[in-house]
Amino acid sequence: MKDLKAGELKMSVSAVCRSEQGDKYAFVTFQDGVRSAEGKIPECKIMKNDGFAEIEVQQLELYLKENLADLKKMAASIDIFSAFKGDH
């Protein structure tokens, strides 16, 4: 992983998970090399925060809400089993 420049925010999306009740959800992680935050969709709530100011957390939650459809598509396109495929 390369070093991030100050102000450069990296986002990653997990594969779709299912709760015991069958509800679908995914995690979205934001990192800038110093700070990190983890949100959950479709709730669009930041669940863990390490270093972001409250106003920034609100902005991240707004980003999750405004981009929910695209984030769901990204999560749905992740094949967690592809990591186990290949020549072994």
Image: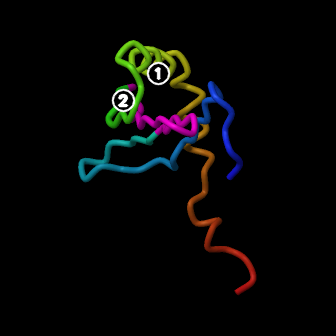
Q: Residue furthest left?
A: 21
In this figure, which residue is indicated by the disc labeled 1?
Answer: 60
Q: Identify the mark nearer the N-term, 1 or 2.
A: 2
Which label was assigned to residue 81?
A: none
Under circle 2, the secondary element is: strand
Rounded to the nearest angstrom, the CA distance separating label 1 from label 2 is: 8 Å
Q: Does residue 58 show up magenta in the picture?
A: no
What is the x, y in percent for residue 34?
Answer: 51, 37
Image coords of residue 6 (percent x, y): 64, 28
> SS at mark 1?
helix
Relative to 67, does residue 78 appear above or below in the rendering? below
Residue type of the residue flagged with mark 2: Ile
Name the residue at 66% across, 38% down.
Answer: 4
Which span of residues is magenta-colored? 28-44
In the picture, the quarter occupied by the C terminus is bottom right
Q: Which residue is tagged 2?
A: 46
> Quadrant location of residue 9?
top right
**Residue 22 x/y as whole percent:** 31, 48
Q: Nearer the viewer, residue 53 or 29?
A: 53
Residue depicted at 55% across the width and 21% down the height: 67
- Say if mark 1 contacts mark 2, CB within 8 Å: yes
